[in-house]
Amino acid sequence: MMGEKNALPNRNSVRGFEVIDNIKEDVERFCPSTVSCVDILTLAAREAVVLAGGPSWPVMLGRRDGVTASQQAANEQLPSPFEPLENITAKFTSKGLDLKDVVVLSGAHTIGFAQCFTFKNRLFNFRGSGKPDPMLDSSALTNLQTMCPNIDSSNTNLAPLDSGSMYRFDNKYYTNLVNNVGLLESDQVLMRDSKTAAMVNSYSMNSYLFWNDFGTSMAKLGNVGVLTGNKGQIRKKCGAVNV
């Protein structure tokens, strides 16, 4: 099945699904056809945040897995690192989320890395200007140009989304945005809008506020497009529908 895992915003980015497959295999051994892959994935997302030093939040269970997949739909609905804030917000609101959720859930970029091709335009040819993004801090620009030289072979090089603490869940992501060292254009753009910039400033100064709001937004996100009752199925293997 070609679906969300293969979508452009996730390509060579979302990894570790073998862990979910292993968990599913163990669960099926003891509780066959009972726990869905989407429930396992939702719980795993929460536990990963907790293990990285972040907050916990309540997760409702009872979801069922889909029986179809669409790579085209995923490409259309998932935000990309190149999109303007208006487009990203529209994609969120179409799922019942709001502008605050955009800012809060973007904070997940406190962990992880991005490939150079996702932000290289900011380093050398921002919006076709032939110059770097003027909003990017000059020291950060120099460091990133070293990591991602303007040659095609550097496109898959990796840079941390949060250069200060890429393995720890904290509010440094927002501090980076305030200091104009956000990596992706879709991240730093949060400082170009007065409403989102105000929220970024608040989270940069109050990690507990971020933790609380992140848990709330993740709970909302976990209830988007849920299948229950007779809809969908409980897959036996997460990578394929039951036959």
Image (cartoon, rainbow, N blue to C red):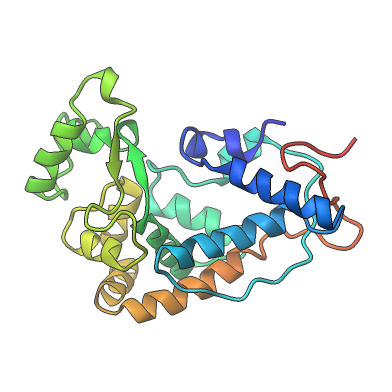
Does residue 147 show up? Answer: yes
Quarter of the image for residue 69 reads top right
| Frontmost residue, 14 versus 132 | 14
| Frontmost residue, 73 versus 150 | 150
Residue in the picture at 22% in, 65% down: 175
Q: Position of residue 199 (x, y in %)?
A: 33, 73
Q: Is residue 78 shown above or below 116? A: below
Q: Position of residue 169 (x, y in %)?
A: 37, 64
Q: Is residue 38 shown above or below 218? A: above
Q: Quarter holding the C terminus?
A: top right
| In the displayed structure image, the side of residue 1 where residue 87 appears, left or right | left
Does residue 127 show up? Answer: no
| In the displayed structure image, the side of residue 100 where residue 39 appears, left or right | right
Q: Position of residue 191 (x, y in %)?
A: 26, 61
Quarter of the image for residue 4 reads top right
Q: Position of residue 153 (x, y in %)?
A: 28, 18
User: How many numbered tags mark residues here?
Assistant: 0
Residue in the picture at 39% in, 68% down: 53
Q: Quarter holding the N terminus?
A: top right
Q: Is residue 85 shown above or below 67? A: below
Quarter of the image for residue 195 reads bottom left
Residue in the picture at 46% in, 64% down: 51
Q: Is residue 75 shown above or below 153? A: below
